[in-house]
């Protein structure tokens, strides 16, 4: 059992074409930018809604 | 080493669908943006902005931006869910067969997941950041468009875009609710303007695409009742729309500038609908329908822009809020 598991896989699995890699990279960048924008949005909305009170909340 | 995509054609049909689920996506960022129907979204954002800006009271610009972003993403999510469900119809029509799903760029499951996630996020964050009335209206809008209109009305009745038009008419009410936390008589007027604007706008387009709708089995009014009846109903709706467009001025909610724009604009809308009715059939009718379609977009834009200008210039306080 352990011998079988230690063998390297013989099937190549899913191999992406260059175009697929390029599009996946573009999607990843877009998701990263969207997440970054979302974090900034939540940060600024929090500051606007709470104002100076953001520092006065009980720990 | 070959890509998995090219191998699937050699598999038996029973296995092809299982393998296709594991195929790497070929969707580009532009395909996901297209799923959001950016042109429809721009109208939604503009009308929501007007509802938000003309509402009494003050909303911090950052919160106003966040509200508009949520409304835009919610509208985009509804568009993605619409494209997911309507992919079979879209593939049959020249206007829509280039959309991401029928073009094979995005898989239906991807569009469904994309739409559901964005819909959930937009509603929850509008509620958390602004207020839950606005979030509830946004949720209602998405469900109304994606379920009531897309899944039910569109394939069932020629009144599909009349009733379904309510979804497109709600954004100014959402903007108003975001700014005030309530629903005002004035925001209902804005809703009614878009609601009665939608049939003449959309039927003018569908007159030019009746063959495609018939081929796709969509019971649009020109397909079911013919061009003459559609032209008659366009005229009737324009006759109702013109006074409703002027109602904010007539009721004292908007200023004289808006009143002038609404009267002239409404009269032109009726005149173009009348000319379409007189044109009958053939190339002249198609030209008249295209002119009316193009003008209807300008009419709605100018009407709402007039409210914005009056508000920005401090000429008119649009109204009071009823919470």
Image: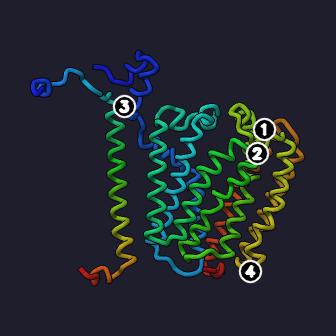
Q: Is residue B32 in view from this perspective?
A: yes
For residue A11, side relative to residue A53 (left or right): left
- Mark 3 to mark 2 CA distance (whole Å): 40 Å
Q: Residue drawn at (29%, 28%), measured in percent from left and top? A: A14
- Mark 3 to mark 1 CA distance (whole Å): 41 Å
Q: Residue drawn at (80%, 45%), measured in percent from left and top? A: B288
Q: Earlier in the sequence, mark 3 or mark 1?
A: 3
Circles 2 and 1 in contact, beta carbons < 8 Å: yes
**Residue carrying label 3:** B22
- Mark 4 to mark 2 CA distance (whole Å): 36 Å
Circle number at residue B158: 2
Q: Chain of mark 3?
A: B
Q: Earlier in the sequence, mark 3 or mark 4?
A: 3
Q: Quadrant of the C terminus of chain B?
A: bottom right
**Residue carrying label 4:** B252
Q: Earlier in the sequence, mark 4 or mark 2?
A: 2
For residue B319, side relative to residue B29 (left or right): right
Q: Is residue B315 in view from this perspective?
A: no
The local crowd at label 1, few if under 14, some if 14 to 19, many if 20 or more residues have their Cα within 10 Å, is many
Residue B205: x %, y % from top left: 72, 44
Vertical order, B309 against A9 (above or below): below
Which structural element holds mark 2?
loop
Q: Earlier in the sequence, mark 2 or mark 1?
A: 2
Residue B7: x %, y % from top left: 37, 19
Q: Residue drawn at (31%, 34%), measured in percent from left and top? A: A21
Frontmost residue, A24 versus B159: B159
Q: Chain of mark 1?
A: B
**Residue carrying label 1:** B223
């Amino acid at each position: 059992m352990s011998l079988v598991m230690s063998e390297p896989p013989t099937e190549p699995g899913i191999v992406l074409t260059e175009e697929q890699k390029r599009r996946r990279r573009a999607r990843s960048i877009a998701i990263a930018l969207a997440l970054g924008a979302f974090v900034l949005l939540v940060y600024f909305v929090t500051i606007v809604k709470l104002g100076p009170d953001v520092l006065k909340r009980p720990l | 080493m070959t890509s998995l995509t090219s191998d699937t054609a050699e598999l038996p049909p029973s296995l092809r669908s299982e393998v296709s689920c594991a195929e790497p996506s070929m969707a580009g960022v532009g395909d996901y943006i297209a799923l959001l129907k950016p042109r429809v979204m721009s109208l939604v954002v503009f009308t929501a902005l007007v509802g938000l800006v003309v509402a009494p009271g003050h909303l911090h610009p950052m919160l106003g931006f966040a509200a508009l972003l949520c409304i835009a993403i919610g509208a985009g999510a509804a568009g993605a869910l619409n494209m997911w469900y309507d992919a079979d119809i879209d593939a049959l029509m020249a206007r829509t067969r280039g959309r991401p799903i029928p073009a094979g760029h995005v898989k239906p499951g991807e569009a469904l997941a994309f739409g559901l996630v964005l819909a959930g996020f937009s509603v929850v964050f509008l509620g958390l950041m602004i207020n839950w009335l606005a979030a509830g209206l946004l949720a209602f809008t998405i469900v109304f468009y994606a379920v009531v209109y897309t899944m039910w009305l569109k394939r069932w009745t020629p009144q599909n875009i009349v009733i379904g038009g309510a979804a497109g008419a709600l954004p100014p009410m959402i903007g108003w609710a975001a700014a005030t936390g309530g629903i005002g008589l004035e925001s209902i007027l804005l809703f009614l303007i878009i609601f009665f604007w939608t049939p003449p706008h959309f039927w003018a387009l569908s007159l030019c695409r009746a063959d495609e709708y018939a081929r796709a089995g969509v019971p649009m009014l020109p397909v079911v009742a013919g061009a003459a009846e559609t032209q008659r109903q366009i005229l009737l709706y324009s006759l109702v729309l013109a006074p409703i467009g002027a109602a904010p001025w007539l009721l004292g909610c908007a200023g004289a500038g808006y009143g002038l724009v609404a009267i002239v604009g409404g009269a032109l809308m009726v005149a173009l609908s009348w000319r379409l009715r007189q044109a009958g059939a053939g190339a002249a009718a198609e030209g008249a329908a295209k002119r009316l379609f193009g003008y209807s977009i300008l009419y709605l834009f100018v009407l709402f822009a007039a409210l914005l200008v009056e508000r920005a210039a401090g000429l008119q306080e649009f109204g009071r809020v009823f919470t």
